[in-house]
Image (tube, rainbow, N blue to C red):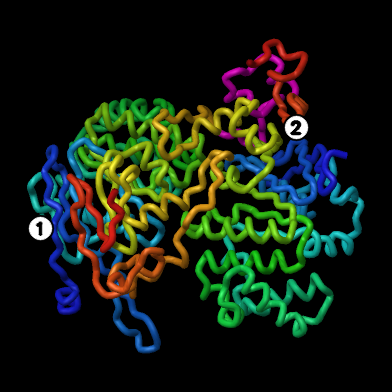
Amino acid sequence: MRGDLLDVRELKVVFYTYRGIIKALNGVELWMNHEERLGLIGETGCGKSVTSLSIMGLIEQPGEIISGDVYFEGKSMQKMSMEELHDMRGKKISMIFQEPVSALNPVMRIGFQVAESISRAKDIKIKEAYPEVLKMLELVGLDSKRTASLYPHELSGGMAQRAMIAMALSSNPKLLIADEPTSALDVTIQAQIMELLDELVREMGNAVILITHDMGVAAEFCDKIAVMYAGNVVERASTVDIFEEPLHPYTKGLLKAVPKIGQSKELVGITGTVPDLVNPPTGCRFHPRCPYAMNKCSQKMPPLIEAKPGHHVACYLYTQEGEHNAN
Amino acid sequence: MLLAISTLKKVNTMPTEVKTETLLSVENLKKYFPVKRGAFRRLLYVRAVDDVTFQVPKESVFAVVGESGSGKTTLGRTVLRLIEPTSGKIIYKNEDFTKISLKSLRIFRRKMQIISQDPYNSLHPRKLVKDIIGEGLKIHFHMSSNEILDTVKETLERVGLREEHMFRYPHEFSGGQRQRIATARAIVLKPEFLVLDEPTSALDVSVQAIILKMFKDLKSSLSLTYLFITHDLAVVDYMSDYVAVMYLGQIMEMGTKEDVFNNTAHPYTILLMNSIPVPDPRHKNKKMIPKGEIPSSINPPSGCRFHTRCPYAKEVCKKEEPKFVKISKGHFVKCHFPIIE
């Protein structure tokens, strides 16, 4: 088995809409071990969030998993009963979201909402959970007594995200999925939240999937990075390898487009636009924008292969059959 | 209201440095928005822009950087008089822009254009691209429809779009393409000065790189001057010549890009730079970042506005507002204890 915590195999997810069938995930391959920090990066509409929802078992109408499976600690989620799934969410997998203020229930006090998640995680009554609530709120750096009695709209974005982290980590989950946790926050607040998350996760030993479009955030937080493009994981490697020896043309392009302080190089963007997933390009979905595209790229999707030890890439440049070998 | 403002007014040491030809000069600009708060609906003011002075040299890129609530967007809009300033002067090419009647503003509006952050809401959804871009031509140059079509076509090519895009609606375009349309609409009037209000923050990085490159190219080919508003210091480094760092309505540090980035003097600028995640996995050091959250601009902290989050704050910072002083040629800082090497 590839990952002892999570193994996503050839996951295909579609959404049925009035415009047609959106082929959101096109055979996603993703795996991770316990206590690993995996960054899932990619641009708008590449399927990062759909992947995380699939891992949570939250794909609902009009969406559907048409093939593939997610294995969590070796167990197939497709075969799990509703009760088992329900039990897993919140206890073994937790999630934090991009818009913390809207992810919280607007008519309930923060204290109650944290207590609710603690009571579910530990199978105790909500009233019994309150001492724990104050402990959790303090852990995330909030003024516990005051914050517990506030409503979500009374919190700033940074405080609300701290409260979300308190809820998510109250069950000490095996896996924490953080879906763009700091994209809506200012840089100084983002730095505070990422530092907090780093400390807590290091202490508690949770595995984390960090979904982000910010290469800087991913570089600072993650051990491994998976790059997604139009519904596929196109490259997966250690963070250092992704930044220093990227293999996939898309990853290379993405890195050249990121502005960096103190770097006088011209930025180079990726020409063309992200494909419409109702009518995605045949074969490799990146081929219309790829400077190295070959004939076969438009015919069949390249498989995700191990090009170097621990460095996986889905590109014909690195397969045996590839006409050219890069480098 | 007038009384409240006049008591707040404080004479500042004005940075009057004439380097190259100045296109736009802003002096002690203020914009307060009235708001009613509390059970008694007390009248209070959001001090969005509070006594800001700077000069934009001709054909340069002047970046205004700050976090949300720092007043950078209000500043950009006030400079164009899309929002009327509460007080202060805006001098555009030796003419006091604040004193011009609304009627004669029209002539200036042609020369000063804005490109806003959200390309999804800034284009009229029920107008064709040719009408969106051509409307200004009709108003300002009284062109015939054929002339308009020719000019629109030419401008579209300038921003990297094609002739056939003229007869489409905004919803048919991606975010990057829409930002190109907004740019075409601005440059078709042959402006001299453009306010770019976070023009790429709604776009993905691969598209951002292309759009920023386009702004750079247009600047040199059309001899434009930019007031570039952004929250992203990496983009500032890539684009600009001069930088002003704003915090709670005031400029904390201002100077050439080299001064602000390499000889940083204000603690806020340093902490802001520390907060930026570095896209380099080998760069791993514990860094100092500002504590706490951004205070409200209705009731900003006394003394230096940054003192509540500043690790170097001393007693005097709480009591006395620091002056905006020059520490070297063209480099200004608003701090009691600037870091000078």
Furthest residue in direction top, as rendered = A323
Q: Would you place residue A275 above or below residue A53 in this image? A: above
Q: Where residue B272 sits: x, y (%)?
A: 41, 53
Residue A117 makes an appearance in the image: yes
- The dominant secondary structure in magenta is loop
Q: Residue furthest front?
A: B341
Residue most extreme to the left: B94
The magenta-colored residue range is A274-301
Which chain is home to disc 2? A
Image position of B251 with respect to A215: above or below = below
At label 1, the amino acid type is Lys
Q: Which residue is mark 1?
A: B99
Q: Quadrant of residue A103?
A: bottom right
Q: Is residue A153 above or below residue A145?
A: above
* Label 1 CA crowd tier, 10 Å (few <14, some 14–19, many 20+): few
Residue A285 image position (x, y, % from top left) = 66, 29
Other residues around mark 2 within 10 Å, as few (<14) / some (14–19) / many (≥20): few
The residue shown at (20%, 45%) is B56
Query: Which residue is under mark 2?
Result: A310
Identify the element where label 1 is drawn: helix
Marks 2 & 1 on one chain? no
* Cα–Cα gap, marks 2 and 1: 67 Å
